[in-house]
Image (spheres, rainbow, N blue to C red):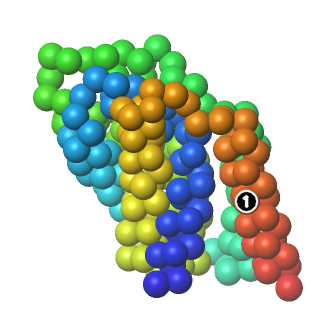
């Protein structure tokens, strides 16, 4: 349960203001929310399954203290990445606008591709080096889906954007706090 709650919280925060959340808003303006949410869930579950397997392999191969310090440094990097922000590029916009294919498969593929190498994937790998695989996988998947569901609601109901600057700063502060905690823990 600890792995679940830690992963859920960290990935939820990491996803706020991420480009895939912007994609969710874009899709939500055009398609049914349930279809978008199901596609996001399927794509996220697959990407995060791969992430926890990679993290588990790294966790076995590397010493625990080194992993903790590296994870802390990675979280400081995630803080900087969060402050820098994400924007939809032309390819992301094109995937969001496709309507000649099944909405589920289009949204699922767009999210799968967008998440490969993204900070939430890297954060999940990092978490899996130290925490239970199943809890990390389920927590990270549901954390991301919850954040994207929020974007869908915002995109469909309000038609307005979340205060991006506040979200970025809050997420960055949390990443710095987690990063420093991991570094201190690793250096003890």
The front one of 171 and 155 is 155
Q: Which residue is mark 1?
A: 174
On screen, residue 46 above or below 8: above
Q: Is residue 43 visible?
A: no
Q: Is residue 79 left or right of residue 14?
A: right
The quadrant where residue 154 appears? top left
What residue do we see at 24% from left, 28% from top? 31
Identify the residue at horizontal 79%, vertical 73% (top origin).
181
Quadrant where the C terminus sits is: bottom right
Residue 116: image location, x then y, percent: 45, 42
Question: What is the secondary structure assignment of the residue under circle 1?
Answer: helix
In x, y percent, where is residue 51? 45, 59
Q: Quadrant of residue 62?
A: bottom right
Can you say whether 129 is above or below 165 in the image?
A: below
Horizontal and vertical percent position of residue 13: 59, 55
| Residue drawn 82% across the image and 67% down it | 180
Q: Residue 70 in the image: x percent, y percent?
A: 73, 64
Residue at 72% over, 57% down: 175
The extreme front residue here reads: 158
Note whether residue 174 is visible. yes
Residue neighbourhood size for the residue with mark 1, other residues' Cα within 10 Å, grouped as few (<14), some (14–19), many (≥20): some
Describe residue 61's horizontal placement relative to residue 49 as left or right. right
Task: Look at the picture and state if 62 lies above or below 45.
Answer: below
Left or right of 181? Residue 29 is left
Relative to 16, say whether 22 is above or below.
Answer: above
Residue 77 vs residue 176, the one in the foreground: 176
């Amino acid at each position: 349960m600890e792995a679940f709650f830690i992963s859920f919280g960290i990935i939820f925060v990491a996803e706020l203001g991420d480009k895939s959340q912007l994609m969710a808003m874009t899709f939500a303006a055009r398609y049914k929310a349930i279809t978008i949410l199901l596609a996001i869930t399927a794509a996220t579950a697959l990407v995060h399954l791969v992430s926890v397997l990679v993290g588990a392999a790294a966790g076995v191969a590397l010493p625990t203290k080194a992993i903790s310090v590296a994870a802390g440094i990675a979280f400081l990097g995630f803080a900087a990445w969060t402050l820098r922000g994400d924007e939809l590029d032309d390819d992301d916009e094109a995937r969001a606008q496709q309507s000649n294919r099944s909405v589920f498969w289009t949204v699922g593929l767009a999210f799968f591709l967008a998440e490969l190498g993204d900070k939430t994937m890297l954060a999940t790998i990092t978490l899996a080096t130290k925490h239970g695989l199943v809890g990390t996988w389920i927590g990270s998947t549901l954390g991301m889906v919850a954040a994207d569901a929020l974007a869908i609601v915002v995109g469909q109901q309000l038609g307005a954007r979340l205060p991006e600057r506040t979200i970025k700063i809050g997420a960055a502060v949390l990443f710095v706090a987690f990063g420093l905690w991991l570094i201190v823990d690793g250096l003890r």
